Image (cartoon, rainbow, N blue to C red):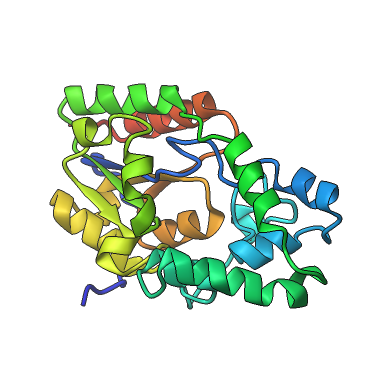
Amino acid sequence: MHSATLPPVSDSQIQAVIFDYGGVFSSPMFRGLGEFEIRMGYPSGSVLELLFGDKAYVGVEGAVHLTDRPVPTETVTHDWHRLEVGELTLKEWFEGVQRRAPAVLGTEIDMAAYLQFMADMPVGVHWPIVHKARALKASGVPIALLTNNVAEWGDHWRATFPVDELFEIVVDSSDVRIRKPNPNIYLLTCERLGVAPTASVFLDDNVDNVAAARALGMETVHVGDNPFVAVAELDAILTRRATR
């Protein structure tokens, strides 16, 4: 297994850029969840805990800022995480949600209402990030996509923008059975790129994932609500550590 003991970020050239999918190329998956809880009369934060068990994303109320965030030592602690590493099927995850709902929400979850909410919030694409990835590839900078994702959703999310056209290297947690922020999935991605972690930049909207990448010596961009800001931060890193 890969070792997670690596030197800090260096001043050498950046040789590769690694992108997350959700919240980086796509709009955040948690947008509007607070409004849904209010509309349904569920306690604040309860639906997020029931479904995903994660408050480390941009736009999630109560999320801890990057500077305050320790690197998690356990990366599979919720059914959603088990789904992302292929330990559960999507059907089993939905069954677990309904089973746990009374204890978390104080009542059964209205799955029809939630599914309608999701249907009304289609995945948007951050085209400035797509264009930046395309420009990097055209200039000869190796790029990779590193995503925590669900096997049953593979065809859907890959169709949201030209994934296969842009990326020769896609590391999907549900395929490799490891999820961020486990350091081994970053090391696997860098190995497939043929670069050291310290010669790479990683972009993600989840502070735990970013903190774990930083701990490996990777340059990082914590992607927020504005994709143009993320592109500017990436450009600043690439200028400071001029890409080949």
- Tell me if residue 131 comes above or below residue 169 in the rendering: above
Q: Is residue 53 left or right of residue 128?
A: right
Viewer-closest of 95 and 59: 95
Occupied quadrant, residue 44? bottom right
Residue 6, x across and y down, in percent? 29, 66
Q: Is residue 236 left or right of residue 51?
A: left
Residue 25 is at least partly visible in this image: yes
- Quarter holding the C terminus? top left
Residue 169, x across and y down, in percent? 19, 46
Viewer-closest of 61 and 103: 103
Residue 181 is at least partly visible in this image: no
- Tell me if residue 122 comes above or below residue 135 in the rendering: below
Residue 179, x across and y down, in percent? 38, 65
- Tell me if residue 55 comes above or below residue 164 in the rendering: below
Residue 54, x across and y down, in percent? 60, 62
- Residue placed at 64% from the left, 60% from the top? 68
- Tell me if residue 79 comes above or below residue 111 in the rendering: below
- Quarter holding the N terminus? bottom left
- Residue placed at 64% from the left, 76% from the top? 99
How many numbered dots are placed on residues in this image?
0
Viewer-closest of 20 and 114: 114
Q: Is residue 9 left or right of residue 63?
A: left
Occupied quadrant, residue 187? bottom left
- Residue placed at 25% from the left, 74% from the top? 3
Viewer-closest of 48 and 220: 48
- Residue placed at 43% from the left, 67% from the top? 83
